[in-house]
Image (cartoon, grey):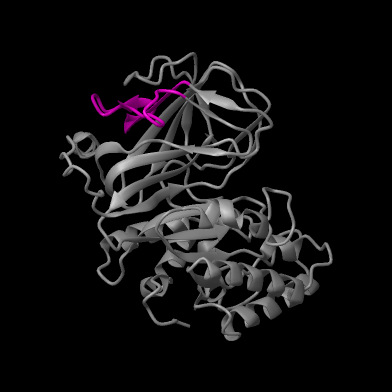
């Protein structure tokens, strides 16, 4: 019954607009995932990609990315529908996407392509399925490696099918898709979570949307305190603020993964532990300079920036007193410098009252660094929702 309602929400008939009138509402990102290199592209392969929307709205659009490609890639078929179970879609929900009125699009190396608006409404909290096929994919593929979500793979083009019969492979990554937007009520905004593996959701439950940004999206959906309703999760496992490695650094990917999304009111910055624990000589002042640059660039783009303190990780193999000293200095800056428009103190949320250098055992996902589902929810619960809105006063 719930899936049928979701399908109806996605597939409602569009109301014709008055000739020459601009569409009502604001385009807002409802889902996002940071782009990275994902091995080699495979020709004549289809991907059925399962994502979870945050804010609801009309005129759904998807963005396909070839950011890390070294040659053009063509998508000759793309559809959007609603998940029923596994690779099977709710009957009648799967609809073709077009690009500039065409059924196919060729995306140049290093570029993105955004689909035309799909008439109708997409509900908040929908398990949306975007199916794409490329006849000529080759060279470096672009996508998001650690999705914490099962998606599906086919040989040949089966994007138009509701059924799962030809989608006999699975993947834990999102290929080529890096954003979904909707036209939400006027004034609606979004927040982008810029982070590493904790934001990416490692140690949360796969296929259950229990990353801390997912819990935050559910809180925002139920809140009347702010018009920020969209959430884009731009975490990359192993990511650093300063150095490329596991994905481009936060500094290098800020424009593409954060500032390019429509409707963004706030950037939620929660990164730094990988810079610290890598023992590459990064000092607290180095990391602080990186934070300041991100804040400056986000402010120049008209966005608020919420800074989050770096959580405890004693017990992780790379922890030592020297790394801990850097973490403490960095956290003092985040809390007290006034550089951020607001602060969320994830360190205080996650740490044990008996040893502030360790994560609380009931929040520990098992490796002494990554929170479990309970810890993820506690993080989201600690965010002052009004701090995400540009019109709100700074909250510390």
- Decide which of 310, 350 is in the foreground and name it: 310
Q: Is residue 86 magenta?
A: yes
- Decide which of 28, 378 is in the foreground and name it: 28
**In the image, residue 354 lies at what x, y percent?**
59, 78
Judge whether 41 appears above or below 274 on screen: above
Left or right: residue 196 compared with residue 167:
right
How many numbered marks, from 0 up?
Answer: 0
Please give the range of residues in magenta: 76-104
Q: Is residue 284 magenta?
A: no
Residue appearing at x 68%, y 50% in the figure: 248
- Decide which of 117, 265 is in the foreground and name it: 117
Left or right: residue 91 compared with residue 294:
left
Residue appearing at x 67%, y 48% in the figure: 247
**In the image, residue 227 lies at what x, y percent?**
30, 66
**In the image, residue 214 lies at what x, y percent?**
41, 54
Q: Quadrant of the N terminus?
A: top left
Residue appearing at x 67%, y 55% in the figure: 252
Residue appearing at x 63%, y 77% in the figure: 331
Residue sticking out furthest to the front: 20
Residue 94 visible to an observer of this rendering: yes
Residue 346 visible to an observer of this rendering: no
Judge whether 33 appears above or below 230 on screen: above
Residue sticking out furthest to the right: 281
**In the image, residue 148 lies at what x, y percent?**
51, 43
Judge whether 393 appears above or below 26 on screen: below
């Amino acid at each position: 019954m719930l899936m049928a309602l979701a399908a109806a929400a996605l597939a409602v008939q569009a109301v014709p607009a008055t000739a020459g009138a601009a569409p009502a509402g604001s385009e807002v990102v409802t889902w996002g995932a940071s782009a990275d290199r994902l091995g080699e592209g495979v020709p004549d392969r289809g991907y059925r990609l399962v994502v979870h929307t945050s804010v609801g709205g009309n005129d759904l659009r998807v963005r396909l990315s070839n950011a890390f490609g070294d040659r053009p890639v063509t998508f000759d078929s793309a559809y959007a529908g609603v998940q029923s179970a596994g690779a099977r879609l709710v009957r009648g929900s799967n609809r073709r996407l077009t690009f500039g009125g065409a059924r196919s699009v060729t995306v140049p190396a290093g570029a993105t392509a955004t689909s035309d608006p799909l008439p109708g409404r997409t509900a908040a909290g929908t398990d949306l399925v975007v199916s794409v096929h490329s006849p000529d994919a080759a060279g470096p593929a672009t996508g998001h490696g650690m999705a914490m979500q099962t998606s599906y793979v086919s040989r040949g083009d089966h994007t138009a099918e509701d059924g799962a019969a030809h989608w006999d492979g699975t993947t834990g990554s999102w290929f080529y898709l890096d954003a979904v937007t909707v036209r939400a009520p006027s004034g609606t905004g979004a927040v982008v979570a810029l982070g590493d593996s904790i934001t990416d959701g490692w140690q949360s439950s796969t296929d259950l949307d229990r990353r801390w940004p997912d819990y935050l999206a559910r809180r925002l959906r139920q809140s009347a305190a702010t018009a920020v309703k969209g959430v884009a999760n731009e975490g990359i496992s192993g990511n650093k603020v300063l150095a490329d490695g596991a994905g481009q650094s936060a500094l290098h990917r800020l424009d593409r993964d954060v500032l390019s999304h429509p409707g963004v009111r706030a950037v939620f910055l929660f990164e730094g532990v990988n810079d610290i624990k890598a023992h590459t000589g990064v000092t607290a002042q180095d990391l602080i300079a990186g934070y300041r640059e991100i804040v400056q660039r986000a402010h120049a783009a008209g966005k608020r920036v919420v800074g989050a303190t770096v959580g405890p990780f004693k017990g992780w193999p790379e922890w030592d007193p020297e790394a801990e000293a850097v973490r403490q200095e960095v956290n003092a800056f985040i809390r007290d410098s006034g550089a951020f428009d607001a602060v969320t103190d994830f360190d205080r949320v996650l740490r044990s009252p008996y040893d502030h250098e360790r994560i609380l055992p009931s929040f520990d996902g098992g490796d002494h660094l990554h929170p479990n589902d309970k810890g993820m929810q506690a993080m989201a619960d600690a965010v002052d929702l009004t701090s995400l809105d540009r019109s709100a006063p700074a909250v510390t």
